[in-house]
Image (cartoon, rainbow, N blue to C red):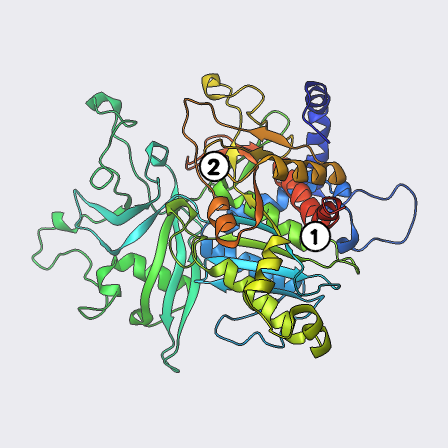
Amino acid sequence: MVRATPEYLAARTSMMSLRAQALEQSMMASQTYYAPPQQPQQPVAANQVNAKDIKPEAFTKPYLEFMTENPTVFHAVGYFKEKLDKAGYKELHSRDSWSGQIKPGGKYYTTRNGSSIIAWAVGKAYKPGNGLAMVAGHIDALTARLKPISTKPSHDGYVQLGIAQYAGALNSTWWDRDLSIGGRVIVKDPETGKTSTKVVKLDWPIARIPTLAPHFGIGMTGHNNQETEMTPIIGLDNSDLNSSSTASSEKPIGPKGSFVSTQPPKLVKLIASQLKIEEYTNILNWELELYDSQPAQVGGIDKEFIFAGRIDDKLCSWAAFMALLHARDDEDSGVIKLVALFDDEEIGSLLRQGARGNFLPIVIERTVEALVANTNTLYQNAFIGGTGLGPGLMGQTYANSFLVSSDVTHAAHPNFTQTNLTDHSPRLNVGVALCVDASAHMTTDSVSMAILDRVAELSGCVNQRHMIRNDSRSGGTVGPMLSSAMGVKAADVGIPQLSMHSIRATTGSLDPGLGVKFYKGFLDEWEKVDKEWRA
């Protein structure tokens, strides 16, 4: 078992400047994810490399690019789809039949609402009843979304925007930030009459929520009114100062009752320009949100930190996704390797694209159903009595499966040490943390910890521990809801970060790659570890 002993941490810390040099070199060179062989030999295919050979520093730059270029859930799902397509995964649409589409050795993905995605690879030696090695996380983040009618009356020459907080956004960290706008737009094709969605983002800041100078004696970190005092400004309109009787603010776009007539005219024109839409009324609706436009970047003396927005949780999710793309493709693998990334975790996961919906269970059931249909009749009769898919087969499948619920966790804080729990507050750039909660807000128990420590041993990883103090409040993850719905063994694993739920947060520059290393190790080694428990 590989544990984060004081001696190990001291040795690792002494290597940080060397790691930083390696990181800087890797960011200037082409991406190389794996350690070179010790002696000349034939190149090793990416899907045959062991987790022990993963170079965490090589994943820093790709992660920074992902975070900067994909600010919303819709952009993130689009990014993942593009990567999957290039890797040979086949998209399956929920409205279509999957019968005859899924086979052992195949790789697939499906989406829901454009904001959640599940991807999976079926082992070449898969047989009905075998289990799944699953990693589940979320890709939504705290934000502020435009209201259905976002036009607001101008005050003192300022054009403002009507927004509503999503989860715990519009906290004090949102003051005086360079905010841009992105999301998805519902568009009608004027020629065919068909409706589609398009993603959009503005690459420069167009909004700001200004603070009040301290001279006025009103604090900016207290209980400010989020409806009246945190309304962003997006432009100026001083037309009311013109004495001409014809002078007025810009008129609404489109006929009364149309969607665009309820939005700021200049914003409508700007979004239409970005999407090359000539007729504004072809914009039927949109889901746009504010996001911090400052790029994700490395920082610290040795560039050992990452500073970025939306780390919770486009950190664990990205690492898990990359792990699936780099998972081994063994000839004798009999399990399904799966990564599920959900929307709406920050608001309770209650919608259909959230983890409390049926998205993951129905994808698994439809996959097993299709795989059973592909199995010859003789095998079906021998294995499941000729009854096909049913509770017996699905119960066996879930019993043979394991879920890693993956969400960021709290790193030890240097300035608020009273919140740290001795030996249970993980550090940056060390490894993932197994998260434990005595009140079952997390799924981890002694069995799942032993399993994942064995995975870490096989993968060359360090597993830290995280637990809150008795005088603190625990957060939640998708783990308990998914584990209880399917009845699968599970554990909660998190990558540490500082400043959770701030508009800008901090993690270690090696942590994305350390996450990839661990999740790849889990996907590759779960089948072997599970057999050790059956011996």
Query: Residue at label 2?
Result: 440
* Occupied quadrant, residue 165: top left
Dot 2: element:
loop
Is residue 138 in view from this perspective? no
Is residue 423 rendered to the left or right of residue 227?
right
Give the percent coordinates (x, y) of residue 325: 67, 55
Residues 152 and 286: in front is: 286
Q: Which mark is residue 326?
A: 1
Number of numbered markers:
2
Is residue 76 rendered to the left or right of residue 177?
right
Which residue is drawn at the image coordinates 46% and 37% (left, top)?
441
Is residue 374 rendered to the left or right of residue 75?
right
**Residue furthest out toward the bottom:** 192
Give the percent coordinates (x, y) of residue 147: 27, 53
**Residue furthest out toward the right:** 40
Is residue 407 in view from this perspective? yes
Task: Give above or below for 291 relative to 83.
Answer: above
Three-letter amino acid code at disc 1? His
Three-letter amino acid code at disc 2? Ala
Within 10 Å of disc 2 (Cα), the crowding (few <14, some 14-19, many 20+) is few
* Occupied quadrant, residue 229: top left
Q: Which mark is residue 189?
A: none
Q: Quadrant of the N terminus?
A: top right
Task: Give above or below for 522 relative to 468.
Answer: below
Q: Earlier in the sequence, mark 1 or mark 2?
A: 1
Give the percent coordinates (x, y) of residue 2: 72, 30
Within 10 Å of disc 1 (Cα), the crowding (few <14, some 14-19, many 20+) is many
Question: Which circle, 1 or 2, is nearer the viewer?
Answer: 2
* Occupied quadrant, residue 192: bottom left
Residues 305 and 338: in front is: 338
Task: Give above or below for 301 relative to 294.
Answer: above
